[in-house]
Image (cartoon, rainbow, N blue to C red):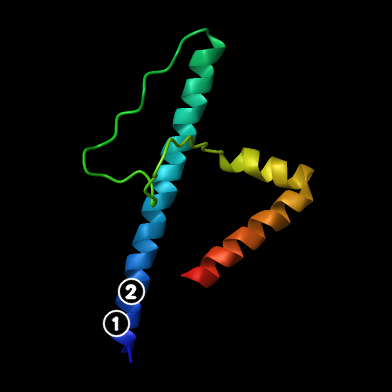
Amino acid sequence: MCTSSEDYQEWRLDLEDERRREEELRADAAEVKRDAALRAQGMEPMPPRRAPGVPTADVIATGAVRCLAVPRDLLRQAVEAEPVLGWELLEVLGERLRDD
């Protein structure tokens, strides 16, 4: 059984992880905006530089993968335009939470 001190420490670590992920998402969204601005001017953006040893995903691909970062505002607009999308996202997230 966990003591309240252990629960608090686990909560703090989870909170720090969540804040780190949010910062990464903000940085990714800013990068997407910069890339779009460059492309609008007919230029191709440089590939992102990541710090060595810093993971950029929580998965390991066994084959070729393409990822898409969707800024929060665009996701919100898409869900407002297509409410079914919002429900589908909730179902997927709910399943993932149950699996953990």
User: Total number of numbered labels?
Assistant: 2
Label 1 near label 2: C-beta < 8 Å?
Answer: yes
Q: Position of residue 70 (x, y in %)?
A: 56, 38
Label 2 to label 1: alpha-carbon separation: 6 Å
Q: Circle 2 — which element?
A: helix
Residues packed near mark 1 inside 10 Å, few (<14), some (14 to 19) or many (20 plus): few
Q: Which mark is residue 28?
A: none
Q: Position of residue 10 (x, y in %)?
A: 33, 74
Residue 52, image quadrant: top left
Q: Identify the residue at horizontal 46%, vertical 32% (top origin).
A: 30
Q: Position of residue 100 (x, y in %)?
A: 46, 70
Q: Quadrant of the N terminus?
A: bottom left
Q: Position of residue 28 (x, y in %)?
A: 44, 36
Of residues 85 and 60, the one nearer the viewer is: 60
Q: List the single residue furthest toward the bottom.
A: 1
Q: Is residue 52 left or right of residue 20?
A: left
Q: Identify the residue at horizontal 49%, vertical 36% (top origin).
A: 29
Residues packed near mark 2 inside 10 Å, few (<14), some (14 to 19) or many (20 plus): few
Q: Identify the residue at horizontal 42%, vertical 17% (top origin).
A: 45
Which residue type carries mark 1? Answer: Glu
Q: Is residue 60 left or right of residue 33?
A: left
Q: Circle 1 — which element?
A: helix
- Which residue is denoted by mark 1 in the rendering? 6
Residue 13, image quadrant: bottom left
- Which residue is denoted by mark 2 in the rendering? 10
Which residue type carries mark 2? Answer: Glu
Of residues 31 and 59, the one nearer the viewer is: 59
Q: Identify the residue at horizontal 49%, vertical 15% (top origin).
A: 38
